[in-house]
Image (tube, rainbow, N blue to C red):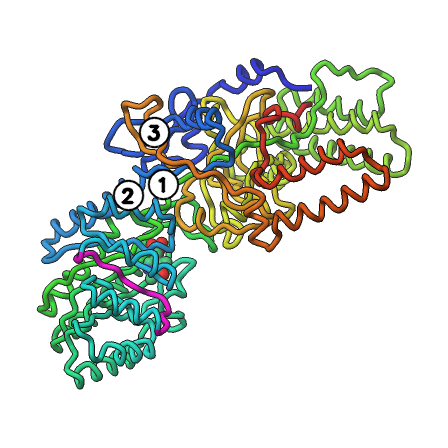
């Protein structure tokens, strides 16, 4: 039995506004001003925060469906990328001006954070006016980035482990007159480079990643310090200086680099690292080396959640403070040591890309427990346990103390247990058990209506159990392993928010589960205002209405790293630009369809021709055995063959939305 739609709405709207929704889903914390909720209760994106263009995401998804674009769909807002590039350079420009810093700042985009060509091109386009460059960390990334050095001033910094072939290609790039800068990660890498470039026709240049004594903070702190995988130690550095000196090749050493790891949580740690590298820089300058660049690596933090946990500490600073810390620290050390200010570089990847993409996922259904219909009657000959539960329910409708409510919960729980025992022993009819079960959930709603409003102090420990009992599994048409890999792998939080009905109070506690046949295929904690972050508040699904969730901040590392668990694979993608003149405030620049079954299977060495031949053999055998008629056989074969060009996710276009599974 479904609750009539108008009734849900009228109940839910009481005392709930879109501001409450913003608070519930912590939009202020993670949106960086790009996302909000409009008066219609729909989520919106404002890709250019300095302009009023505001795109209604709910209407946008409706529009994409009309164009036959399959969900799940990844939306890329190219203007958000561009805004972030400008904001980062703006913050450094302000810091440089305020401190009177004697040189400039240039950003480098580390493509590993999102190598998609359109993303790289958009970043370069927006960064052109600031002289932005690129960073690569592997052979394939070098091959992808090198031809993008259109102008000779543009810098390409090459980190990562480099084999001889890679060092040769870098050297070739330098001979072409391009600013390709290998950063020596290991001493033997330098030795190879040193020999390779000994008779170079043009002056070679290189940098070094220094193993600092400071180690980072946060999850990726092992990226620096003694135990880090990469970096030149101070004794090795001294040896490099001696080798360069002896060979008369001092001027080739051009850049100093460190990288504290992603998501640096603590700006004081950054300050110490910058101080250390600046001192090294100053000594090198004083010895006559002409280091031009000081590269502070990546790690600019992005706030996904305000909650701090041991495994996922919150970011404690903003962009302005980050830029000020770098600029003033370098300037102070240089001024003290009487050396010129170097060109500052940073390699912010997450900070540039995280906000620009979001995944839209349709909720296919929910296993909401069935409640007792409002018109159900309990008569004198109803089952005794049902009557006992009904009495508890009646009592809870009146005003009761919290002690009594908790006691009532204990009683209801015990009655439910008793019913289960009776059923196991064969003493309870299925119909009675069904009524008791439904009555239990109705009673639990009444209990929760009271415990929900208890503050944290003191909070009866049963509250936790009550809340967990009330969490529904909501099935989303997506794969955690493809689209939110870091959630599964390292427990990172990602903001999730419905795209519609945000002017209605979300009355359900929900857990989002995915399509994979894997019990880990779920979102296990949420960015929420609730004390318990193991569920998210969602709306009761309605018949004949699609319910969409936005999974936000997917742009860094997620949408490029996905894994093919259960062969779901790459989702559809739409690239959008904001434009106030267009209907809806946007235009679609590009659509990339999601992967088809054929290509997905090829990745694991199944080929359509072989599979179809096998299927054909089976079907012919069945015709010969007289099991099916040839016409039917051909239909089956045809149906099978058509799957190769289908998408891998649920196609909901032939299905009533959402509520099939909730129909109460
Ligand atoms: C990964 C990486 C980056 C990017 O780090 P973010 O935290 O995404 O900014 C920058 N530099 C190096 C050397 C890296 O390995």
Question: Which part of the image, by quadrant, shows the C terminus?
Answer: top right
The residue drawn where x is 72% and y is 25% is 392
Gap between marks 3 and 1, in whole Å?
16 Å
> From the viewer's perspective, is 199 left or right of 209?
left
Q: Earlier in the sequence, mark 2 or mark 1?
A: 2
Gap between marks 2 and 1, in whole Å?
9 Å
Proximity of marks 2 and 1: CB atoms separated by less than 8 Å: yes
Q: Which mark is residue 243?
A: none
Which label lies toward us, 2 or 3?
3
> Between 438 and 603, which is closer to the camera in this rendering?
603
How far from the left and from the top, in percent, is residue 11? 55, 17
How far from the left and from the top, in percent, is residue 614? 71, 48
The residue drawn where x is 39% and y is 35% is 27
* Residue 160: in magenta span: yes
Q: Which residues are magenta?
A: 152-164
Q: Secondary structure at mark 1?
A: helix
Which label lies toward us, 3 or 1?
3
Task: Identify the residue position indicated by label 1 in the image.
Answer: 356
How far from the left and from the top, in percent, is residue 452? 56, 31
Task: Identify the residue position indicated by label 3 in the image.
Answer: 587
Kindly give the residue lying farthest to the right in the view shown. 426
Residue 471 appears in the rendering = no
Task: Identify the residue position indicated by label 2 in the image.
Answer: 84
Q: Secondary structure at mark 2?
A: helix
> Between 592 and 216, which is closer to the camera in this rendering?
592
CB at disc 3 and ligand 1 closer than 8 Å? no
Q: Earlier in the sequence, mark 2 or mark 3?
A: 2
| Image quarter for ligand 1 | bottom left
Q: Magenta span: helix, strand or loop, mainly?
A: loop
* Structural crowding at the residue carrying mark 2, measured as other residues with C-alpha within 10 Å and reported as few (<14), some (14–19) or many (≥20): many
> Between 400 and 649, which is closer to the camera in this rendering?
649
């Amino acid at each position: 039995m479904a609750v009539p739609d108008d009734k849900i709405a009228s109940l839910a709207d009481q005392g709930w506004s879109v501001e409450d929704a913003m608070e519930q889903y912590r939009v202020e914390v993670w949106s960086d001003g790009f996302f909000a909720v409009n008066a219609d209760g729909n989520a919106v994106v404002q890709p250019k925060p300095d302009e009023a263009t505001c795109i209604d995401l709910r209407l946008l998804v409706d529009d994409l469906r009309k164009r036959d674009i399959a969900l799940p769909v990844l939306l890329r807002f190219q203007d958000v990328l561009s805004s972030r590039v400008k904001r980062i350079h703006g913050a450094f420009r302000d810091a440089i001006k305020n401190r009177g810093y004697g040189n400039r700042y240039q950003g480098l985009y580390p493509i590993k954070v999102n190598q998609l060509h359109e993303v790289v091109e958009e970043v370069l386009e927006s960064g052109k006016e600031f002289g932005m460059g690129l960073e690569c960390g592997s052979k394939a990334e070098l091959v992808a980035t090198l031809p993008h050095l259109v102008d000779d001033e543009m810098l390409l910094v090459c980190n990562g482990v480099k084999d001889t072939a890679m060092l040769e290609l870098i050297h070739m790039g330098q001979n072409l007159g391009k600013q390709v800068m290998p950063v020596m990660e290991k001493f033997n890498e330098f030795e190879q480079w040193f020999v390779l470039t000994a008779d170079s026709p043009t002056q070679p240049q290189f940098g070094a990643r220094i193993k600092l004594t400071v180690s980072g903070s946060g999850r990726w702190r092992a990226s620096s310090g003694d135990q880090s995988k990469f970096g030149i130690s101070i004794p090795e550095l001294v040896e490099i200086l001696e080798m360069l000196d002896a060979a008369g090749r001092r001027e080739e050493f051009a850049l100093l680099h460190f990288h504290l790891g992603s998501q640096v949580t603590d700006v004081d740690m950054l300050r110490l690292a910058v101080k250390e590298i600046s001192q090294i820089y100053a000594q090198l300058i004083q010895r006559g080396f002409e280091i031009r660049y000081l590269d502070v690596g990546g790690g600019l933090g992005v706030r996904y959640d305000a909650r701090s946990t041991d495994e996922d500490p919150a970011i404690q600073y903003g962009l302005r403070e980050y830029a000020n810390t770098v600029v003033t620290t370098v300037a102070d050390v240089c001024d003290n040591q009487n050396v010129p200010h170097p060109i500052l570089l940073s390699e912010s990847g997450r900070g540039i890309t995280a906000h620009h993409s979001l995944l839209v996922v349709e909720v296919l259904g929910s296993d909401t427990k069935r409640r007792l219909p409002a018109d159900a009657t309990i008569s004198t000959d109803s089952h005794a346990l049902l009557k006992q539960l009904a009495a508890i329910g009646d009592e809870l409708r009146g005003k009761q103390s919290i002690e009594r409510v908790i006691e009532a919960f204990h009683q209801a729980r015990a009655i439910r247990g008793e019913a289960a025992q009776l059923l196991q022993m064969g003493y309870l009819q299925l119909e009675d058990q069904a009524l008791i079960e439904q009555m239990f959930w109705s009673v639990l709603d009444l209990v929760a209506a009271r415990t929900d409003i208890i503050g944290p102090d003191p909070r009866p420990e049963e509250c936790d159990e009550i809340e967990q009992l009330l969490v529904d599994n909501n099935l989303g048409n997506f794969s955690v392993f493809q689209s939110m890999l870091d959630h599964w792998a390292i427990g990172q939080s990602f903001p999730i928010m419905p795209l519609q009905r945000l002017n209605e109070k979300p009355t359900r506690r929900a857990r989002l589960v995915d399509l994979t046949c894997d019990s880990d295929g779920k979102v296990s904690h949420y960015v929420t205002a609730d004390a318990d972050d193991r569920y998210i508040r969602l709306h009761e699904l309605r018949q004949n209405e699609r319910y969409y969730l936005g999974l936000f901040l997917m742009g860094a590392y997620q949408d490029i790293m996905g894994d093919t668990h259960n062969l779901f694979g790459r989702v559809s993608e739409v690239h959008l630009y904001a434009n106030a003149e267009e209907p809806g405030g946007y235009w679609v620049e590009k659509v990339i369809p999601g992967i088809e079954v054929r290509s997905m299977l090829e990745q694991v060495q199944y080929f359509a021709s072989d599979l179809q031949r096998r299927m054909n053999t089976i079907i012919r055998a069945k015709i010969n055995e007289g099991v099916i008629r040839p016409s039917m056989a051909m239909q089956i074969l045809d149906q099978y063959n058509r799957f190769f060009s289908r998408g891998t996710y649920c196609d909901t276009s032939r299905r009533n939305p959402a509520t099939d599974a909730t129909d109460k």
